[in-house]
Image: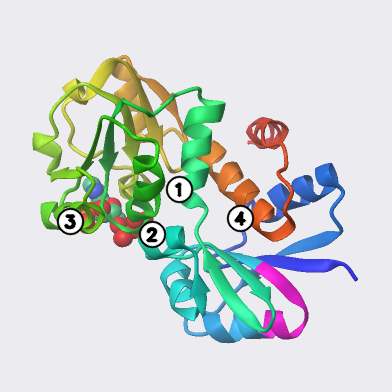
Amino acid sequence: MTDRYAVFGHPIAHSKSPQIHAAFARQTGQDMTYAAILAPLDGFPASVAAFVATGGRGANITVPFKEEAFRLAQQRTPRAERAGAVNTLVFADGEIRGDNTDGAGLVADLTRNLHRPLGGRRILLLGAGGAARGVIEPLLDEAPAALVIANRTVARAQELADLFGRGVAACGFDTTGSGFDVVINATSASLAGELPPLSPAVFAPDALAYDMMYGRDTPFLAFARAHGAATADGLGMLVEQAAEAFFVWRGVRPETAPVIAALRHAA
Ligand code: ATR
């Protein structure tokens, strides 16, 4: 029987995950389907239960259900625990297991696709919401020289710094310090077409500016480019977090480069 997977979100119509996983399945010869399911805002657990009852083997979870998926999971991986959110569910042995592949996806995109080693480098992470929290642990595991979290509401950045320890520093946008090798935008400012008020001095001479949003040139990336930084959007992270989820479910690592290229071409 063909194994069934799906992504749950609200909204979900524009999700690229079905396309990405269909490409992975073709490439690796896995017998599976992958659908997009619009869960009601007040009915996420019931929607997941219905999917499991009809033979669902696993799911990806996107906005706004990642924290609810965390609570729904009866078992969680350490990286999901640290992220406080779950983007990947495994349904096996009558149990729901929760994982989080977002941070691994970001690190894979930065290091493998964009050729930006993070060890010994200075990283500035903008934002202190769920998106930022989800990537901190895997960034720290790369042993950067510094990881600074800057946020509009400094207290939220400080909470995250306290939660993770390991030398993580917190500040506001006006007190970040300067000379970062990688500056990652994990705020939702880009959604509103806004730019965190940063000094151009945040960018080291050969810095990379990375926006976790994809599909449009954000004010943050335009600002970074104007000040000499290289730029990348979050499309590679999207494909890499999917590849990591695919590996969790199927035990096979798909090649991501052709899938990223195809999505870029289609955009
Ligand atoms: P997500 O799950 O996408 O991270 P969130 O938890 O609501 O969503 O967090 C949104 C993040 O974007 C926060 O860091 C928020 O800053 P505050 O903590 O000060 O609210 C940040 N953010 C949202 N709009 C912003 C803007 N216009 N400028 C700068 N930061 C913004």
Q: Which mark is residue 162?
A: 3
Q: Badge 4 is on which residue?
A: 15
Q: Badge 2 is on which residue?
A: 83
Identify which residue, 92 or 211, lies in the foreground: 92
Q: Position of residue 204 (x, y in %)?
A: 26, 18
Determine the secondary structure under disc 3: helix
Q: Residue at x 52, y 53 (%)?
A: 101
Mark toward the start of the polypeptide (2 vs 1): 2
Identify which residue, 115 or 217, lies in the foreground: 115
Q: How many marks?
A: 4
Question: In the rendered structure, does residue 37 fall within the stretch colored magenta?
Answer: no
Q: Position of residue 27 (x, y in %)?
A: 82, 42
Q: Residue at x 62, y 61 (%)?
A: 13
Q: How is the image coloured?
A: rainbow
Q: Is residue 253 above or below residue 226?
A: below
Task: In the displayed orientation, state which residue is furthest to the left.
Answer: 175
Ligand 1 found in image quarter: bottom left
> Is residue 215 visible in the rendered structure shown here?
no
Q: Position of residue 174 (x, y in %)?
A: 10, 36
| Residue 95, quarter of the rendered image | bottom right
What quarter of the picture does the N terminus occupy? bottom right
Magenta span: 50-58
Q: Badge 1 is on which residue?
A: 103
Q: Residue at x 23, y 46 (%)?
A: 166
Q: Residue at x 44, y 24 (%)?
A: 116
Determine the secondary structure under disc 4: loop
Q: CA distance from mark 1 to mark 4?
A: 19 Å
Q: Are marks 1 and 4 in contact (CB under 8 Å)?
A: no
Judge depth for marks 4 and 2 and give the one in front: 2
Judge depth for marks 1 and 3 and give the one in front: 3
